[in-house]
Image (cartoon, rainbow, N blue to C red):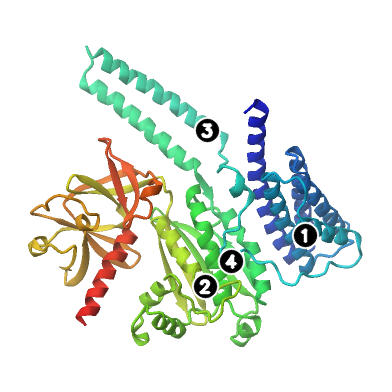
Amino acid sequence: MDEFEIDREALLATFLAEAEEIFARMEQTLVALEKAPGDEGLLQALFRDAHTIKGSSSLVSFDVVRDVAHDLEDVLERLRKKTLAVNDVLVTLLLRSVDVLRSAVREAADGATAPSEGIAAFRAELAAAAAGPAEPSAPAAAAAPAADGAEQTPAQHHASRTLRVDVAKLDRMLNLSGEIAIVRGRLSEMLERRAGVTLEDALTAHREADRLYLDLQELIMKARMVPIGPTFLQHARTVRDLATASGKLARLEVEGEDVEVDTSVIEHIRDPLTHMVRNALDHGIEAPEARRAAGKTPEGRLVLRAYHEAGSMVIQVSDDGAGLDRRRIAEKAVAQGLVSDAARVTDEDLARVVFEPGFTTADTVTELSGRGVGMDVVRRNVEALRGSVGIESTPGQGTTITIRVPLTLAIIQGFRVGVADETYILPLDAVIECLELPPEETAASAPWGVINVRGKPLPYLRLREHLHVAGDRPRRENVVIVQHGNQMAGVAVDELHGESSTVIKPLGGMFKGIPGVAGSSILGNGRVALILDVAGLLRETLKRYATQAAAAA
């Protein structure tokens, strides 16, 4: 690959990342313009973004993108000259133009040089809007986002992951790296010279290197932190399109948009957020007539909220709709075999079955729902982040879904346990307490059991049998009580090694999907330790306990 090709690849990667940022911003601006059609600032911002896309696409020879952006500029120019009025039909056309630009960028990145039939037809619509006095005709239906919430963007499709970092932070990282190199050289010189070097001197040099390393680690973690606001605001388009498609009125409100979280966490919560927003609009917020009859405003309110709590990131999706239909959920849960008695369904049961795979209260499949996929995706993605999800609902007043996830996925505080010669790590925030397994349970050979903890039954899972670890069991075993959400269970292990800071390493492809395992880490002695999936272990333990209880009844 010659120098020109390398430069072009870098230029293309930058263009794709920046183009998606501009498209997301244009969608948010258009939704805001629909609510404030006389805002000149919004209109000027739209025009600047369209002009930037036109110029940038020329630099990378994406001629089709350039031409569509030029047509969009013509329509925006009429708006600036007040010869065309802003209304919901025109905003829909302009939002579709963002979709077409995304498609054109994707096709050009794949090597296409001529416009597709759909892009050519849409350019004709834009030309008609720019030239004719009549308002553009409304499409048959407002274009809603893809049903799975995973619309592919140009940046995701072709470019590597990127992150903007303050130059001052990079300068500080470089300075710290230099200081670490100096201390490292000093320590190496001491070890080679030996003569005249005391243990205290070596320890002092080691502590200095360790302090600098921790400072560098903290700075790198801060560099990865990004505000949640842009991710929240991307859903303004989703709310607008879905409300239009379903004949409802809804507005999006954002709270805590300046709250920062690790960029990898942002990537994992995008899909869950999309599904929760869709679910709130489809099942929660009522039609305007129903809201008026209930004494509410005709426009529903959907709130995306973020805040920090005890070292975790909390994200809430709240609506002021009808709330969960407890009776219908209970009936559907019984029909699908998720619970046995509709009359005995508790609030915890309701929250659990809503997230079960395939569960839905819809009688028919629509573009918005009915397949029982969305909330299951929410639970799986959140648990993959070592997080938890819960639901609170008040009939007639609305529903709030709360997600708790770690601030970062790179490092966790872990609690190390031993089974035979192997070491395993439990996330420290999931550990409640440690107890000695009663002698009668240690003597038993069952892979799981139930113990009495202060008068309450606690099911436990023996990690040795669950992971098929070879070797004889010790005479004394311990139980680590872990919690995920509102559920608790025990994990029986041979030894307790204590807490430590753990750097998470992803599992290889052939090891993904192992029940009860979330990742791995390298120990100080060079050996690999598996990081345990508390949610998975809890589900397995409680399922066995429920089966045993049902059989006994």
Cα distance, mark 4 to mark 2?
A: 10 Å
* Quadrant location of the N terminus in the rendered image: top right
Marks 3 and 4: in contact by CB < 8 Å?
A: no
For label 4, the crowd category at 10 Å Cα-Cα, with few meaning under 14, some 14 to 19 and many 20 or more, is: some
Residue that mark 4 sits on: 147
Residue at image location 43% in from the left, 59% down from the top = 382
Of callouts 4 and 3, the N-terminal one: 4
Left or right: 382 as drawn, with respect to 242: left
Residue at image location 52% in from the left, 30% down from the top = 171
Residue that mark 3 sits on: 170
Hey, what amino acid is under mark 1? Asp
Q: Position of residue 328 (x, y in %)?
A: 46, 84
From the viewer's perspective, is the residue at label 1 or at label 3 nearer?
3
Residue at image location 28% in from the left, 39% down from the top = 523
Residue that mark 2 sits on: 371
Marks 2 and 4: in contact by CB < 8 Å?
A: yes
From the viewer's perspective, is the residue at label 1 or at label 4 nearer?
4
Of callouts 1 and 3, the N-terminal one: 1
Of callouts 1 and 2, the N-terminal one: 1
Residue at image location 22% in from the left, 74% down from the top = 548
Element on which disc 2 rests: loop
From the viewer's side, name the closer residue of 200 and 244: 244
Marks 2 and 1: in contact by CB < 8 Å?
A: no
Q: In which quarter of the view is residue 37 placed?
A: bottom right
From the viewer's perspective, is the residue at label 1 or at label 2 nearer?
2
Residue that mark 1 sits on: 39
* Quadrant location of the C terminus in the rendered image: bottom left
